[in-house]
Image: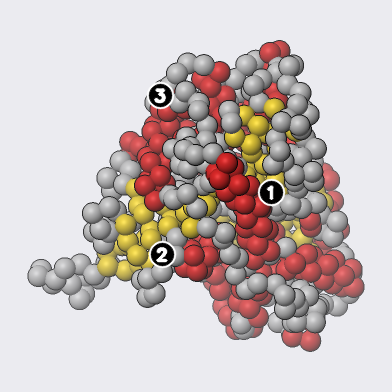
Amino acid sequence: MRFTDERSSSTNPTNRQLRADGYGRATDDTRADESTCPGLLIVVSNRQPYRHEYEDDEETATDTDSPAIEVDEPTGGLTAGLDPVLQESEGTWIAWGDGEADFDVADEDNCVAVPPEDESYTLRRLDLSEEAVDSYYYGFSNRVLWPLCHGFTDLVENRSNDFDWYRTVNERFADAVCEHATADSVIWLQDYHFALAPRMIRESVPRSTTVAQFWHIPWPTARTFQDCPAGGRILEGLLGNDLLGFHVDRYVESFLDCVQRYLPAAAVDRSRRTVRYNGTTTRVVATPMGVDAESYDRDARSVSDAEISDLLDRYDISNENVIGLGVDRLDYSKGIPERLAALERFLERNPSWHGEFTFVQSCSLSRTNIRTYERHGDLVRSEVTRINRRFETDDWKPIVYTEDYLSTAELCALYRRADVMVVSPLLDGMNLVAQEYVAASVDGDGTLLLSDRTGAHETLGSHAITIDPTDIDGFASRLEAAVSMSSHERQQRMNTLRNRVFDGDLGWWMETQFDWIRRVHSESRREGRRGSGTRGTHSGAARDGTPDSSSGIAPESGSASGTDSNSDTDSDPNSDPDTGSGSDSDSDSDSDIDPPEHTSTA
């Protein structure tokens, strides 16, 4: 090991830097174990929590046997976090049914009771054709909204039918919601796949029904958003929400900028972070998402020395080497080519590290039927090959690249063993990998290099090593500082990082979300008692394609100069006088809650 101070074994429990409860967080008996919802909860997401597949067991199958069905269950992230909430509330989850056996086990309404072992809530599945999936998901969602929101306007592909399908699928989800919604329901939509659905839902449900959404990816600046096809409709759709959440304040401010500039009829109150438009008041809040920190801590502690050694042996990595780690989807927003360039610069400057430092880059394939992703994958692989050929020896490669599936246990083993974790997206809504690494660093002596362009930097940046992912020389210098840092400084930094990750974990985020939802739900019910019917008397342009301002956005020169940021202050008796921010401080994510790559069976 080439650290300034001699480092203890990465699996030695005496080296742990923990707080009183043993998990790096303060014990709080008053904190609820599970979040609660104020009404009947309906969750809407692209990805479903349970998927039914036919077992592929040729040895036991016979010609007369019906194929056995197995269930894929949630293993982590938002899906696993919401599952117990739905069980508690006995609510409904509406999602795309992408499993081969999904509709064979569903009833005539495409519903199935889940979880299989303790049926507590309803999973409503939508059967989408291959054309719908190609245009709605792989098309407008990931060829337009994803690159646009991550600042890659040059990669936006506005294919002719994609937005029409996006609108159609949003209508189908909205119709499904309305079939299950009641006057007391709370509808919670997840992410950018459903930008149009909130307005559609709002026009069809009672006033007292609460519509909320969390946008898990970045929100672009107003200048970038002007390149959004049908941008006006996107904004109108999102303003059908009573509550709209982002990870961090700067995305809230960017969203309000876009509304103020491109929807002249909207009244934006920045002090309260509310927008009044077409009879609906939308409160916009910032709450950074966390991870199930205790789970990663527990899994990391269960890893043995032998298991770590076996994992390193699998990839021909010396256990004596200092190990750097990157864990990403193979996405152009993650900054992997820039990371490789910084590693090359580090190796050029530091020949003494040759043979003693190994960087492990784990990539999971993503959206492989989009040509941009295919080209990006080819670039990453070719750069790894080129750099390795330049520096490798007979018994050492500087970069170990893998696209293998890693189980949670294997991932936690890598997190625990890694001396340096590099999280360097060019732009990211939150990035949960950084938090996973910290939660799994149970020995308290790893170092996190973190891009200043992630939402996670808002809460972790002060005790991570901050990097500008595009400054290759600076990036390499930061890597040099990380591998040379003293043990005392590593442990001090990691202890603070762990406190923050555990204090702001997934449970905290869920509680904060439902605190906001309870608040707006109470307001919605008060409004509902004063009136009747549905809210929003819009002409329905979002559904019928009426060519008004929703068909696009005005050019930047046509800003909404008549919009008064305080014009709604006196006209909204239910507005609250506080600022409306759920946090001082996005992702997927990468909170990344995208589904695995599956083809629709419809």
Residue 469 placement (x, y as % from top left): 75, 44
Closer to us: 162 or 172: 172
| Residue 322 in which image quadrant | bottom right
Task: State whether residue 166 is above or below residue 181.
Answer: above
Which residue is identified by label 3?
544
> At 79% across and 43% down in the image, what residue appears?
577
Compute the Cα span from label 1 to label 2. 28 Å
How crowded pointer 2 is (Cα within 10 Å; few <14, some 14-19, many 20+) is rated as many
Task: State whether residue 135 is above or below residue 56.
Answer: above
Q: Amino acid at mark 1?
A: His
How crowded pointer 3 is (Cα within 10 Å; few <14, some 14-19, many 20+) is rated as few
| Residue 465 in which image quadrant | bottom right
Task: State whether residue 553 is above or below residue 511.
Answer: above
Which residue is identified by label 1?
247
Residue 220 visible in the shown view: no
Compute the Cα span from label 3 to label 2. 33 Å
